[in-house]
Amino acid sequence: MEMDETLDDAQKRNPHLSEYLAEFQKNKKSVPLFITQLSREMALEKTPNVIYPVGDPIFIHIYGEMGKDIEYFVIEPRLKHDEINKYSLIVERVLEKGIKNKAPVSKEKLKEALLSLFDETVKTGTIEKRLFAPPAIPVTKEEYDKFSYLIVRDIIDAGPVEATMRDPYLEDIHCIGLNPVSLVHKIFGNLNANIRFDSKQSLDNWLRTMSERIGRPIGDANPIAGGTLPSGSRIAIAYSDDISRRGSSFTIRKFTKTPLSITQLIKWGTLSSEEAAYLWLCLENGMSVFLCGETASGKTAALNATLVFIDQKAKIYSAEDATEVTPPHDVWQQLATKEEGAEESQVHMFTLLKAALRSRPNYIIVGEIRGVEGAVAFQAMQTGHAVMATFHASSVKRMIQRFIGNPINVPVTFIDNLNVCVVLHSLYRNGMLIRRVAAMEELEGYYEEAGGVVTRAVFQWNPSNDVHEFRGMNNSYILEEKIAVRQGFRDKRKIYDELAIRARILDAMVERGIFDFMETFEIVKAYRDGGLEGLPFPV
């Protein structure tokens, strides 16, 4: 069986995997399923017992019972008791030698230099005496493989949490003090891992290293830090017991460099093909759209997925604290805040947005609006610039309340410069974490006689049957009064035919298994340039 052969190959390359499996089968009397790719349907399994690789020599084992405890076991080379002192001595020698060398300019060069110093420090087989230098440290072949992995993991990579950084199925990594690391898995939900820091000093040292990698060093004087790691993931750190009373803590929100595609979100039920087609029309025609929801409701993932709908020739500016927005367009200026250093050298979101306005972009994308920069975003819309942004609010009503209140203070009469609000929710259903577009609402305008801003719900999620209902059929202000007028439709209702065609195109992509982000961008582009005849498949 091919799957068994794959497991056999993995065990031949990784003796520690064989040792782990032998011990597990001895204690639990069961054999884990070895698989290279997980499916979301696995969330329905009552007793998951699966091992998957995340890059040699690391494997992940998910085991437990749904509704009770499901645990996340990292399988990687580990030091035996009699190897700890030897490994510590090797690391000490390597670091002593490394101080004398010039720092490499890239991670790959750094890894090459580190392994070269490691090879100078250890020796398998007969030890040769060296003049004016300490003798090489003898290691076995098994120790050589183990130590070479661990020294790269601990000095260059993410140390004890490296396995979680490699795992593409994780969304969130969280640790408080010396407690086990807790995780949010895309398929299996909240899990505890067999990872923990062995001492307060090791945790604090690790946090200092991570803070330096994001350019915001922590210490007793500045115990709170946050930013983007070189991998693109976002880390938030609370350092020292004075601030984090149960011990220094951190949260890492994983971010993939290749965004989820709109078709993948449709397949998962996050939104319907009609909702995606509606956003396609909105973004192609320069409407301003905000994606709102609670923390981890999928706002940024949905924003990235919909960027394929913006005209490929558009000039895009993005402004963010943590760089997560990834439009596929050629003309994209990426701006990021700078909060470290002297106050006069800092650059805040407010400044970035003002700079973006001077460049006359077709679209301004704000990673997340938190404060006074929200007023600048509305000024941009007031002057004719299309804006996309994410915002923490659980409904359109609360979004409006936050924008017109302190500290943003947007005049209520300006609110209708925003065209569409997409509200996302995340929830657990049958033990499975799901994300849904709960509503899409249009902001029609401010009417004094109505006592505020009038909105229309064009789509509404029905949780009882998990269906996205299109309530805006023949009643959409944005489609009829904005987009149909802009496109020169004599009969404004014909815009709904165009919506239906685009929904069919998206459904056809899902049916054909087209889930690659860039491929969806190319198909959207093909339809824009050549209509239905330009598509690579019939609709």
Image (spheres, helix red, strand yellow):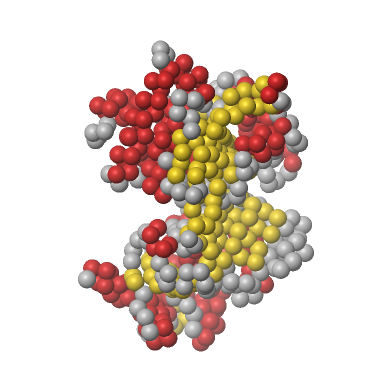
* Residue ID at (61%, 76%): 198
Q: Position of residue 48 (x, y in %)?
A: 41, 70
Q: Nearer the viewer, residue 100 or 432?
A: 432
Q: Residue furthest front?
A: 464
Quarter of the image holding residue 526? top left
Quadrant for the C terminus, please. Answer: top left
Taking the image as shown, residue 323 lies to the left or right of residue 147, namely right
Quadrant for the N terminus, please. Answer: bottom left
* Residue ID at (30%, 76%): 12
* Residue ID at (57%, 20%): 384
Q: Is 272 situated above or below 85?
A: above
Q: Position of residue 464 (x, y in %)?
A: 49, 49
Taking the image as shown, residue 75 lies to the left or right of residue 242, namely left
* Residue ID at (38%, 67%): 52
Q: Is 127 situated above or below 305?
A: below
Q: Position of residue 32 (x, y in %)?
A: 36, 75
Taking the image as shown, residue 204 lies to the left or right of residue 34, namely right
Q: Position of residue 170 (x, y in %)?
A: 48, 59
Asked whether residue 96 is in view, the answer is: no
How many numbered marks are there?
Answer: 0
Q: Is 67 situated above or below 329?
A: below
Q: Nearer the viewer, residue 63 or 147?
A: 63
Q: Nearer the viewer, residue 136 or 118?
A: 118
Asked whether residue 41 is in view, the answer is: yes
Quarter of the image holding residue 382? top right
